[in-house]
Image (tube, rainbow, N blue to C red):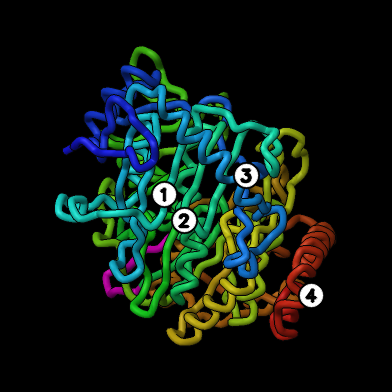
Amino acid sequence: MSRPFDLKSLRIHASEVLRNPSAARLYELAVAHEGAAILASGALATFSGAKTGRSPKDKRIVRHPSSEQRVWWGPVNIPIEPDAFLACRTRALDAFKNQPRVFVVDAFAGWDPASRIKVRVLCSRAYHALFMRNLLIRPTSDELEQFGDPDFLIINAGHVEADPSTPGLQSKTGVLLDLDRREMVILGTAYAGEMKKGVFTFMNDAMPLRGVLSMHCSANEGEQGDVSLFFGLSGTGKTTLSSDPRRRLIGDDEHGWNDDGVFNIEGGCYAKCINLDEEDEPQIFHAIRFGSVLENVVFDADTRMPFYSDSSLTENTRACYPIEAIDHAKIPCMAGHPSNIILLACDAFGVLPPVSKLTPEQVMYHFLSGYTAKTAGTEVGTVEPEATFSACFGAAFLVWEPAKYAELLADRMRRHKADAWLINTGWTGGPHGVGSRIKLSHTRAIIDAIHSGELAEIPTIEDPIFGLRIPQACPHVPSEMLFPRRSWGSPEDYERAARSLVARFHANFSRFADQTSDAIKRAGPR
């Protein structure tokens, strides 16, 4: 139940301040004032305006003497001075003065009480409040009563543009994080995902300081309590493959790994829904109901049915729903230590095997590499497949040097004896435009064989180019598909394509050469 809430300490004197309002109340306000619509499934359809994705070039981290030594400065974390941040903060708070209502969402990040933080979100849009109500962990009435001051504050004034003349800014958009003040300011963008990733970025600093590994991955648990982590960039299948009706979902995107095991950082899911299909992804499809938010999804004005295949607004259409909407979710979202670490790559060049077992050194190499590939047509100007590398499968949200997170992962894998696998969810029989996308049913069969333990018992053959150990067989997967060289029409064409990708791997990994051991460097492609 929403109660009156005082924001005078922030100099906000709005006529109506709604703290943790119900989903139904937020629906009413979003439809009445924000152009939102209720779809046939019961989901709330919303639009973020001109920005339909994150603005990484406008992200800034405040440079403080107390924290600057641990920050990975560069294109991911661009510095800004404290005075400039405070100017943007003042601009953001002033933007709430003329708003008819202000929304406050108080909730937690991190299901494990020993590792959680308290988050407060201030925003002017009902849809943003519903979004964060879904994606954070909703407190009980008693917890809300005793919430107190937050550990992290998000001031989302995205309805007002930033002043581009502010030192350190380059546009009318600002996504600014101050690690010392424990605050985030958003100006000039209504894309809701900025808030979600702001919390994760903060956790990528706060958790390692406590000795906890923060991870951009999904996680699920089998009937015997075995836990799997799925690392992968957008489009590799991280959300899809972890949403398995035979296993309990711990979470689809962000997790921590402490001395007791794995826990979800979030209270909900944020799934890509471009080309969403009920048969292929039934759990996600049926989670989109009352209480969920569809962002930038085109729908029929009369029937209110969504057109999931319509990318006219953006390829980055999204569905946001509380984790309780997944039938097989494990609540509370906590589990033991992982048995399997699964790295996902959508290889559009078609040269990586569909599955390979990794040595500890190969895990570090491929974790630091964070490889996937963009396909032709997904972005303006992309004609041929394009290799993409994102350290730790989430470079855009890291605060520390990537090698620090890799060291934490290696330590935990050693202690808990987890197996590791590299899964290609991309192309087989040739590159994009020649070969075919690996069927989801085949990838699921591979994952099933990993979880049953069958795949770990099958002998492997070492690939001469990538050095990966490929299982000689896998139940319900054509044997010829397991070895990419055999599935191509021309071995010479395969060789050229494979060598070309190897060169890209080497060029990317050169930036980690002085941070890693010779054994890890030798674990890469040859």
Q: Earlier in the sequence, mark 3 or mark 4?
A: 3
Q: Is 201 situated left or right of 323 in this image? A: right
User: Disc 2 vs disc 3: Cβ atoms closer than 8 Å?
Assistant: no
Mark 3 packing: few (<14 Cα in 10 Å), some, or many (20+)? some
Q: Earlier in the sequence, mark 1 or mark 4?
A: 1
Quarter location, residue 403: bottom right
Q: Nearer the viewer, mark 2 or mark 3?
A: 3
Residue denoted by label 4: 526
User: Disc 3 vs disc 4: Cβ atoms closer than 8 Å?
Assistant: no
Q: Is residue 296 magenta?
A: no
Q: Is residue 224 magenta?
A: yes
User: Disc 2 vs disc 1: Cβ atoms closer than 8 Å?
Assistant: yes
**Could you tell me how far apart the alpha carbons at marks 2 and 4 are, in whole angstroms?**
44 Å
Q: Specify the label residue 153 is tagged with.
A: 1
**Could you tell me how far apart the alpha carbons at marks 2 and 1 are, in whole angstroms?**
6 Å
Task: Say which amino acid is labelled 1.
Answer: Leu
- Segment tinted magenta in the rendering: 218-226
Task: Say which amino acid is labelled 3.
Answer: Ala
For the N terminus, the image quarter is top left
Residue denoted by label 2: 182
Q: Nearer the viewer, mark 2 or mark 4?
A: 2
Task: Say which amino acid is labelled 2.
Answer: Arg
Q: Earlier in the sequence, mark 2 or mark 1?
A: 1
- Nearer to me, 433 or 34: 34
Task: Say which amino acid is labelled 4.
Answer: Arg
Q: Position of residue 124 (x, y in %)?
A: 39, 30
